Amino acid sequence: MDSNLIYKVESKGEGMKVRDYMKDVLELSGRFIKKVGLSDRIKINGNVVRLNYKLTEGDILIIQVEKKNESQNIIPEKMDIDVVYEDMDLIIVNKPVNMVVHPTKSYPKGTLSNGVLNYFRENDEKCIVRLVSRLDMNTSGLIMIAKNQFAHMSLAKSMENNLITKKYLAICHNNILEDSGTIDANIGIAKEDSIKRSVIDSGQRSVTHFKVLERFKKGSLVELNLETGRTHQIRVHLSYLNCPIYGDSLYGEEEGQYIKRQALHAYKLILPHPRTGEVIEVQKEMPEDMKRLIHILKEDTK
């Protein structure tokens, strides 16, 4: 399969400028159009053209998806990468707990991005790491990474239009009263803490859908689906219901007695493929530390 985008110009494209056809017919982002136009990555019938070139029905429009030899200020590091799905545009990996997604001043190496970049290099892929989704350091689960600018643009647009479903599993204290429902409560930064978030009227609208999968004497296993994607959204919303996540030292217990991190796992993704639109569904079962916690809670329920 060719990594370029190839289109045969339809009758409605007759006389249209390349720029307008890409924006109005192909629905590509203005930023992407500008970048490929300025870097000579647009061809009509094999010849490089400018964005103001006028099209004729039947023209073959080829867009080079990626510039060659892209670089990134990340050091490749060899590590085991749990690849759940991969194709020419997209890779979905299972992030382990206690791992930061992207290098920061505090964590300049040992991050998921360092490992994924090394994985690309080992497989002779020249792409850079373009994160589509992120997770907190102590949350495990699925993360989407685009392999090229077009895929990143397309997936970001799907996220913005709520076309991507992200489902999580959480083990929380206490029992949520309803078996299923929606938490619609604004989230903002708590005044006393620049890291901690809280439910406040002046915050951003935040919506979490939930379904209780199993109840225990001292907690619940809950499936959660994010309609919005605020920082710490699930953790804040469950704490708001007086059902904080086990092991969550920021929004619940001070020290995890049964698990050493928040019992939260991003286990399922449903998304339209950035190139074909075909629906992709992937999932990854919860890690062993969460399984052990469930076993403990089940034993205590007997």
Image: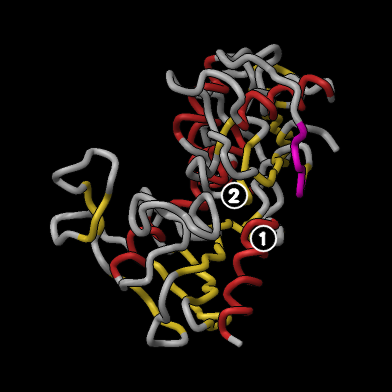
Q: Which residue is mark 1?
A: 286
Q: Position of residue 263 (x, y in %)?
A: 53, 59
| Residue at 57%, 39% in the rendered image | 98
Q: 263 and 281: which one is in front?
A: 263
Q: Position of residue 50 (x, y in %)?
A: 56, 19
Residue 291 occupies quadrant = bottom right
Query: Which quadrant: the N terminus?
Result: top right
First in sequence: mark 1 vs mark 2? 2
- Secondary structure under the numbered disc 2 in the rendered image: strand
User: Is residue 145 a member of the stretch shown in magenta?
Assistant: no
Q: Which residue is mark 2?
A: 140
Q: Which region shows up in magenta?
A: 80-85
Tell me whether the residue at label 1 lies in contact with that at label 2, contact meaning CB atoms closer than 8 angstroms.
yes
Q: CA distance from mark 1 to mark 2?
A: 8 Å
* Residue 273 drawn above or below residue 170: above
* Residue 266 drawn above or below residue 225: above
* Residue 23 drawn above or below residue 272: above
The amino acid type of the residue labelled 2 equals Ser
| Residue at 67%, 60% in the rendered image | 286
Q: 30 and 189: which one is in front?
A: 189
